[in-house]
Image: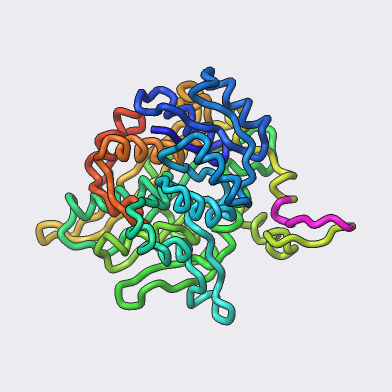
């Protein structure tokens, strides 16, 4: 397989590091606006022919198409902030390549009732073009990281093997990660974190369809394996848009353990307008406030040596099996020390990258396949679950 990797930040590096050991990967083009960063990752890979470096401007569709054609890639892997999704998605369609991302096209709140009704939903741009991808015989695999991605595979596995009837599929994410030397340092893209945490969270119920609520609503305590109890709150996330399309459930939710300090910082950024992704004039220079926030904070890709602790991602499912009530939590725990030692990447980005590489493997070997715009739960879950241990990315199952 030949892959054009658009974006060589923390997750992009982890994708390259995990895929490097796989014989099915013929070539992965490391393309980034920051060429020095791409060159840094290429040196770690140690194979210039297999991991060539290219400059890319992901805001220019023609730039993406040119690189895809130059290297005759089979798949375009989108590993940049989702503001560029439409251009990369459309470029893959134009050149006839498979497409994969880990976060779908962006949402826009309802103009008059944002905390009750969805406006433009995550992935609407992509799903609106699904028939065109089907007609062209092309596949766009959307939302294939850890959450969304692995969590969606778990939901499909629960439907296929663990339940006769599902009442709720609830994605729950928590961690005890600490970062030494920083009063505030996100361990994942702050651009993406601002987007998903400050937008109105979306929920799904069979009787109501998709609807929204207030940010950070419905707090609950969830007991995470190897971490313990963590308060989690509603956050906008792709699983709620994906799971109900292929998994029969009465309700779908996503809750994330953010912590009081993190929520406080996000609320302050919003109050000051620093979460704005539209450019403003600052002394004659056009700049997006959110980009300034990103520039002021440390790069999560370079925090691994200062991080300690674990992160847990998973899918809580409640329903009926053999006439009896059942609750399970399917999960994956990533330990930062182990991820740094094995992959040279911190736990949060490594955990995100695994699912994308496993999906590439399954596509290359025909275990997953199809056309159109599909989420991970559209595919049989068993091949993915079987690959997790092989990739040193084991999952667990806890009866609740």
Display colour scheme: rainbow
Residue at the outermost top position: 46
Give the vertical position of 231 relative to 311 (above or below).
Answer: below
Q: Nearer the viewer, residue 201 or 16?
A: 16
Can see residue 139?
A: yes
Position of residue 380 relative to residue 310, above or below, is: below
> Residue visible at 65% across and 42% down?
185
Q: What residue is drawn where x is 54% and y is 46%?
A: 65
Residue 347 in sight in this render: no
Q: Position of residue 31 (x, y in %)?
A: 58, 36
State the residue in front, 16 or 52.
Answer: 52
The magenta stretch is 284-291
Left or right position of 381 against 50: left
> Residue drawn 70% across and 62% down?
278
Q: Quadrant where the N terminus lies?
A: top left
Q: Is residue 290 magenta?
A: yes
Among the 4 quarters of the image, the one containing residue 305: top right
Q: Position of residue 120 (x, y in %)?
A: 51, 70
Q: Is residue 173 left or right of residue 372?
A: right
Residue that lies at the very extreme toward the left in this rendered image: 322
Residue 83 vs residue 136, the one in the foreground: 136
Q: Residue furthest right?
A: 283
Asked whether residue 131 is drawn in magenta, I would say no
């Amino acid at each position: 397989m030949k892959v054009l990797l658009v974006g060589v930040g923390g997750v992009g590096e982890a994708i390259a590091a995990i895929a490097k050991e796989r014989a099915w990967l013929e070539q992965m083009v490391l393309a980034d606006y920051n060429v020095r960063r791409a060159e840094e990752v290429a040196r770690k890979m140690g194979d210039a022919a297999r991991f060539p470096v290219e400059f890319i401007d992901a805001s220019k569709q023609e730039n993406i198409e040119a690189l895809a054609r130059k290297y005759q890639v089979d798949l375009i892997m989108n590993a940049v902030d989702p503001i560029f999704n439409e251009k990369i998605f459309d470029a893959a369609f134009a050149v006839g390549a498979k497409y994969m991302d880990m976060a779908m096209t962006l949402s826009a709140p309802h103009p008059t009732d944002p905390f009750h009704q969805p406006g433009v939903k995550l992935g609407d741009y992509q799903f609106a073009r699904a028939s065109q991808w089907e007609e062209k015989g092309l596949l766009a695999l959307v939302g294939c990281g850890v959450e969304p991605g692995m969590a969606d595979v778990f939901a499909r596995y629960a439907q296929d093997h663990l339940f006769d009837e599902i009442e709720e599929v609830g994605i729950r994410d928590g961690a005890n990660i600490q970062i030494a030397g920083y009063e505030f340092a996100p361990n994942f893209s702050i651009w993406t974190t601002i987007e998903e945490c400050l937008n109105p969270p979306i929920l799904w119920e069979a009787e109501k369809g998709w609807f929204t609520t207030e940010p950070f609503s419905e707090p609950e305590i969830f007991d995470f394996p190897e971490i313990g109890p963590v308060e989690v709150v509603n956050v906008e996330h792709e699983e709620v848009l994906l799971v109900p399309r292929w998994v029969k459930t009465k309700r779908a939710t996503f809750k994330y353990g953010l912590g009081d300090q993190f929520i406080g910082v996000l609320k302050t950024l919003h109050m000051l307008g620093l979460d704005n992704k539209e450019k403003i004039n600052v002394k004659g220079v056009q700049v997006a406030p959110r980009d300034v926030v990103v520039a002021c904070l440390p790069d999560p890709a370079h925090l691994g040596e200062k991080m300690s602790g674990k992160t847990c991602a998973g899918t809580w499912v409640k329903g009926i099996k053999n006439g009896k009530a059942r609750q399970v939590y399917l999960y994956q725990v990533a330990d930062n020390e182990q991820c740094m030692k094995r992959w040279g990447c911190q736990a949060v980005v490594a955990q995100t990258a695994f699912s994308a590489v496993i999906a590439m493997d399954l596509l290359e070997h025909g275990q997953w396949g199809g056309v159109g715009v599909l989420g991970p739960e559209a595919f049989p879950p068993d091949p993915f679950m079987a690959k997790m241990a092989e990739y040193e990315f084991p999952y667990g199952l806890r009866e609740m």
